[in-house]
Amino acid sequence: DSGVTQTPKHLITATGQRVTLRCSPRSGDLSVYWYQQSLDQGLQFLIQYYNGEERAKGNILERFSAQQFPDLHSELNLSSLELGDSALYFCASSATGELGEQYFGPGTRLTVT
Amino acid sequence: GQQVMQIPQYQHVQEGEDFTTYCNSSTTLSNIQWYKQRPGGHPVFLIQLVKSGEVKKQKRLTFQFGEAKKNSSLHITATQTTDVGTYFCAVYNTDKLIFGTGTRLQVFP
């Protein structure tokens, strides 16, 4: 158990819909990262927040957005969903947000039908 | 952008055989991390290397960072069925952790 929690575990929704994925980092970790893992694209970095502020952005689509709240939990919002958005979405946390170990949550499996 | 290639993509070994996965970059790396992801699981941090030529060991696992800091390897001695999973290298590049393509290891008893 990494100490990072993600909800929900599974999500099935239709194209065009909007969903919100939630992540609670390990106690004391200030940085949260979101990743997308699909069979053909591997593990792709989406976005990082550090203590409430966006720190780094990866290959995140404009239809996707994220935020980190004062209690440090984070949400990833996916809108206008397409079939290709079906993937595993992982959240990870780290203490400082710089070079160092990242602790991954169990992931949310999103299926868009 | 930064790309990190791993080879092989898949490896099937008999239990007790050794296994090695390689991570290669076209640019000099400041650091490299290794993660393991069991089937149906999430990536778990194994180790971080930062120094040229660095070698670190964890029981049957040996990690190496190339002298030119452009490649790294993970070697498992005498594989066990518990070693099954996908092994990823990852590098930091402008605040982003870029994951390699991964090597899926299957161990037959």
Image (cartoon, coloured by chain):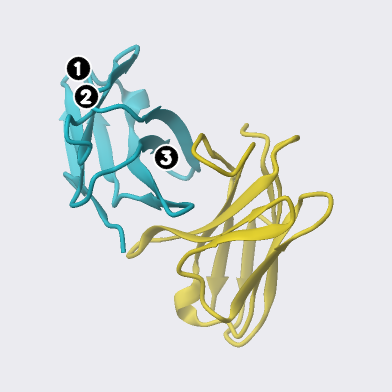
Instruction: Point out which mark residue B16 bears.
Output: 1
Query: Helix, strand, or loop for circle 2?
Result: loop
Name which residue type carries label 3.
Answer: Gln
Q: Residues within 10 Å of mark 3 (few under 14, many from 20)?
A: some
Q: Residues within 10 Å of mark 2 (few under 14, many from 20)?
A: some
Kindly indicate whether the residues beneath marks 2 and 1 are on one polypeptide chain.
Answer: yes
Question: Real-space Cα distance between discs 1 and 3?
Answer: 20 Å
Q: Residue at x 70, y 68 (%)?
A: A20
Mark 2 touching mark 3, by CB under 8 A?
no
Name the residue tied to disc 2: B53
Q: Earlier in the sequence, mark 2 or mark 1?
A: 1
Q: Report in which chain the residue with disc 2 lies.
A: B
Mark whose residue sits in front, 2 or 3: 2
Q: Report in which chain the residue with disc 1 lies.
A: B
Q: Which chain is cyan?
A: B
Q: Earlier in the sequence, mark 1 or mark 3?
A: 1
Name which residue type carries label 1.
Answer: Gly
Name the residue tied to disc 3: B37
Kindly indicate whether the residues beneath marks 2 and 3 are on one polypeptide chain.
Answer: yes
Where is residue B56, by image quadrant? top left
Determine whether B69 is above or below A71 in the image: above
| Residue B90: % across, % down | 37, 44
Per the rendering, the colour in which chain A appears is yellow
